[in-house]
Image (spheres, rainbow, N blue to C red):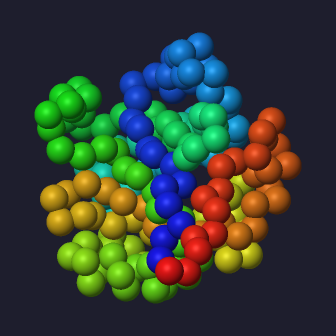
Amino acid sequence: MPRGIDHVGVTVPDINEAVHFLERAFGAVPLYRNVTPDHAQKGPESETILGLAAGTIVREVCMMALGYGPGIELFEMHGPDQCPASRPCDFGLQHFAVYVDDIEEGCKRFIRAGGTLLTEPQKQPFLEEGPGNLFCYGRSPWGMIVELLATPSRGRFDAVSPERRYEPPLRQAS
């Protein structure tokens, strides 16, 4: 069973403005930048992994802590035919992430429930890399992107973060 939501991903037009707003509005704390302009993600592999339109560039990604709950992962992306933010009455988010202890079983449950995986589970990149740290994205039946992830090895990003990144607590067996 999933532990709970680990973070929510939000695509923004300017990541620095978004970080500044979240700091001011909610006391959010930037933890680390996992993708930077010097190492932007682009090309067919990134497009497949994240379900992006061809030609989209992931320019920068910043994980933010917000109180005692799930994190907010900001994505600055630029791509063809990019649309403004959805209205509250529209369906979906950029993605939300669900922490699972067994990613293979989590993926099977996701598929059984009607979801479609975009890729098989793979190693987390850059600062999030570590033994057992895996992720994959899938699409819900209504088209929203959901990430499944496990990060049992948190030392690399915890070492550079001003606060520990939120980790959902173990669920009690019912």
Q: Is residue 134 visible?
A: no
Q: Residue 57: name its quadrant.
A: top left
Residue drawn 47% across the image and 38% down it: 75
Front position in the image: 34 or 68:
68
Q: Is residue 138 visible?
A: yes
In this view, which residue lies farthest toward the top?
Answer: 24
Front position in the image: 154 or 43:
154
Is 50 above or below relative to 1? Answer: above
Residue drawn 82% across the image and 43% down it: 160
On the image, the x and y values in percent for residue 114 come to 21, 76
Residue drawn 38% across the image and 74% down it: 119
Front position in the image: 43 or 87:
87
Q: Residue 131: name its quadrant.
A: bottom right
Is 94 above or below relative to 22? Answer: below
Would residue 108 be found to the left or right of residue 86 on screen?
Answer: right
Would residue 60 be found to the left or right of residue 12 on screen?
Answer: right
On the image, the x and y values in percent for residue 134 come to 58, 72
On the image, the x and y values in percent for residue 173 come to 55, 80
On the image, the x and y values in percent for residue 151 come to 65, 66
In this view, which residue lies farthest toward the right?
Answer: 159
Would residue 27 be found to the left or right of residue 143 on screen?
Answer: right
Q: Residue 48: name its quadrant.
A: bottom left
